[in-house]
Image (cartoon, helix red, strand yellow):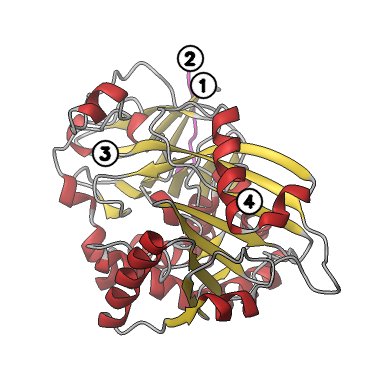
């Protein structure tokens, strides 16, 4: 029989990645009683993500609302990590270094020029550079670099340190960590009232926050009409150790590139680690590191920075981004009273952590949806069904298969939020 908790919590957060922990921390600061449910809190997709804070260089056509949300979060980051470091005693690894985006051939240059023109139309602070100017900023770049843009406001944070800091801050703020996984959403009287856990505990709450990343649409017991349309998008990533060259760092800032139409990024950490990523694969919940994925990343990185193949390879890993049909997150109350969404951040989970925490904390404490969250209401997908990962067959027909998924499968052990 289930063990029923007789002391219901104000807020129950299902998922202990950086999004879930940040929301929990903000709610606890507002005086709410908060429980986080996760078998391994702080060890989700942040263990894989690169941590680029790049709302400008990450911009895609048609994503202007997401840009506004990303800029708002980026503006909050410096104060957010300073507060977090003080509360936790852990350095979140924030670094204001800027981002250089470059192109390697004429086609890539033309694409980057179009993006730059789009950025300028939106009034963004982006400077165009010649190939020589790019190499002056980063001498290790290949001579073939044809041009690029520099964005001084796109920075980075170390997602692993960020997760550790949030975990410590939650503990200091009195957040209860329940190290198990949800096996069923509990609904009573047309309202979500908590979850049943794998260890047999029935947790009750005034508000249940679904922050389980790619698995947010898989929680048994969730009515089909409110299940978030989130799918996993696999990303493989590499970590290498940099060495100085002639007294200069191997790379001094984030570098993004368009290589034969594909996108690549390199994120140099102050501790000497260089993160290279990431593939975009529709492979369901598979997180296998493949030879092809590693080869693709190293091939493109070598073309961009030839010296990279001389660096020691420290780690290969893969994680899952929670993708949505419009690539934007779901933030706020669902159509089921008592169930709140904080998921679907896709490529921007780490970037959007501060603003998600602030917006959800405001709603959960006051009941009012902040204006900035309005465009990301789960209601925009009301009645939609959770999409299956794309297959070769569906890609060939340019369609996306959908399925309701059975409710007899529990959320896997490691909820995850995003891989950048």
SS at circle 4 = helix
Q: Which residues are magenta?
A: 2-9
Q: List the residue tagged with mark 4.
A: 302
* Residue in the foreground of this view, choosing between 274 and 76: 274
Of pointers 4 and 2, the one earlier in the residue sequence: 2
**CA neighbours of label 3 inside 10 A, class few (<14), some (14 to 19), many (20+):** many
Q: Label 3 vs label 2: CA separation?
A: 32 Å
Of pointers 3 and 4, the one earlier in the residue sequence: 3
Residue for point 25% across, 22% down: 393
SS at circle 1 = loop
Position of residue 276 relative to residue 390, above or below, is below
Of pointers 2 and 1, the one earlier in the residue sequence: 2
Q: List the residue tagged with mark 2.
A: 1
Q: Label 4 vs label 1: CA separation?
A: 51 Å
Q: List the residue tagged with mark 1.
A: 200
SS at circle 2 = loop
Of pointers 1 and 3, the one earlier in the residue sequence: 1
* Residue in the foreground of this view, choosing between 175 and 118: 118
Q: List the residue tagged with mark 3.
A: 229
């Amino acid at each position: 029989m289930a063990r029923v908790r007789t002391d219901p919590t104000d807020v129950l957060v299902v998922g202990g990645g950086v999004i879930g922990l940040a929301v929990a921390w903000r709610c606890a600061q507002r005086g709410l009683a908060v429980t986080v449910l996760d078998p391994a809190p702080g060890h989700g997709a942040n263990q894989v993500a690169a941590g680029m804070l790049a709302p400008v260089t990450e911009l895609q056509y048609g994503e202007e609302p997401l840009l506004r949300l990303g800029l708002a979060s980026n503006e909050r980051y410096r104060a957010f990590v300073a507060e977090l470091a003080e509360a936790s005693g852990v350095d979140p690894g924030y670094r204001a270094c800027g981002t250089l985006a470059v192109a390697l051939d004429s086609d890539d240059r033309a694409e980057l020029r179009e993006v730059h023109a789009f950025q300028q139309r939106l009034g963004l602070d982006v400077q165009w550079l010649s190939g020589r100017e790019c190499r002056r900023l980063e001498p290790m770049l290949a001579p073939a670099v044809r041009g690029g843009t520099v964005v001084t406001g796109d920075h980075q944070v170390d997602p692993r340190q960020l997760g550790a800091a949030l975990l410590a801050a939650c503990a200091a703020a009195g957040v209860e960590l329940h190290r198990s996984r949800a096996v069923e959403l509990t609904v009573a009287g047309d309202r979500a009232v908590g979850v049943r856990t794998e260890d047999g505990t029935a947790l009750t709450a005034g508000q249940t926050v679904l922050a389980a990343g790619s698995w947010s649409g898989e929680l048994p017991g969730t009515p089909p009409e409110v299940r978030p349309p989130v799918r996993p998008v696999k990303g493989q990533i590499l970590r290498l150790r940099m060495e100085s060259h002639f007294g200069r760092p191997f790379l001094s800032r984030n570098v993004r590139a368009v290589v034969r139409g594909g996108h690549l990024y390199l994120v140099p950490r102050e501790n000497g680690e260089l993160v290279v990523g990431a593939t975009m694969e529709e492979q369901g919940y598979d997180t296998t590191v493949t030879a092809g994925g590693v080869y693709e990343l190293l091939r493109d990185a070598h073309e961009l920075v030839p010296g990279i193949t001389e660096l020691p390879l420290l780690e290969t890993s893969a994680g899952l981004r929670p993708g949505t049909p419009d690539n934007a997150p779901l933030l706020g109350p669902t159509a089921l009273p008592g169930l709140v969404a904080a998921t679907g951040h896709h490529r921007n989970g780490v970037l959007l952590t501060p603003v998600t925490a602030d917006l959800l904390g405001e709603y959960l404490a006051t009941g009012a949806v902040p204006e900035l969250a309005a465009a990301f209401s789960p209601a925009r997908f009301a009645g939609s069904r959770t999409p299956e990962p794309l297959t070769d067959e569906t890609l060939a027909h340019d369609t996306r298969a959908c399925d309701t998924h059975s409710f007899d499968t529990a959320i896997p052990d490691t909820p995850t939020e995003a891989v950048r």
